[in-house]
Image (cartoon, rainbow, N blue to C red):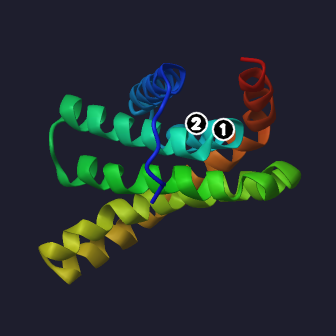
Amino acid sequence: MFPAATMSVKQIARIAMMAAMMAVVFTMFSQVLYLEAITLTIAVLALTFDRREVFYAALVFTLVNMLVQGVSIWTFAYCLIYPVYAVVFGSLKAKLLQHRWAAVVLVGFCSFATGQLLDLPFIVFSPKVTLIYIVMGLKTSLVQGLLSALEALFLLDPLIDRLEKL
């Protein structure tokens, strides 16, 4: 995905700090129903820092999360979903910084999609079970996506401004 290159100690430290930030945000908000802030965190980091660094930070975060919470369908799915979000936000960085409303919509959509994508692995067990999970989880995903979009609406600019000063 990315060309082979060496990383400096500064880049590795930045990746570790971003992964730690993601872990803290994920853990803090996982106790609150419908409130998910990891997508906003990834978006803010991807709109502030280098796409490659945020990708690796998201990968490190998901692997640490898997070690802490155990290997399961959900934690494995996180390893696929969140690094992809980092690449998506990083690839669209110029457009999203120019059109902040698009960033708000994309955060909301990605948050909604997370809930739906996490249900897809159940197709291994049965397509009917997957359909039931998706339909039953639709309300939760819609509320989660809307709340994440509201988080982005109010917090995206202040968080980016703070991180740019680092």
Examine the rendering and report whether any part of residue 14 can be seen: yes
Q: Quadrant of residue 160?
A: top right
Helix, strand or loop under label 2:
helix
Are the residues at dot 2 and dot 1 in contact (C-beta closer than 8 Å)? yes
Establish if 134 lies above or below 22.
Answer: below
Residue at 45 percent across and 57 percent down: it is 114
**Is residue 127 or residue 1 the one in the foreground?**
1
Examine the rendering and report whether any part of residue 111 can be seen: no
On-image quarter of the C terminus: top right
Residue 103 placement (x, y as % from top left): 74, 53
Left-right relation of 98 to 141 = right
The residue under label 1 is 44
- Residue 67 has which mark? none
Residue at 28 percent across and 38 percent down: it is 63
Establish if 162 lies above or below 119.
Answer: above
**Is residue 80 or residue 123 the one in the foreground?**
80
The three-letter amino acid code for the residue at tag 1 is Val
Left-right relation of 131 to 23 = left
Residue at 38 percent across and 42 percent down: it is 59
Helix, strand or loop under label 1:
helix
- Residue 41 has which mark? 2
Residue at 21 percent across and 81 percent down: it is 128
Establish if 21 lies above or below 57.
Answer: above
Left-right relation of 162 to 136 = right
Residue 119 placement (x, y as % from top left): 31, 64
Residue that extends furthest to the right in the rendered view of this protein? 98
Residue 142 placement (x, y as % from top left): 55, 60
Establish if 140 lies above or below 56.
Answer: below
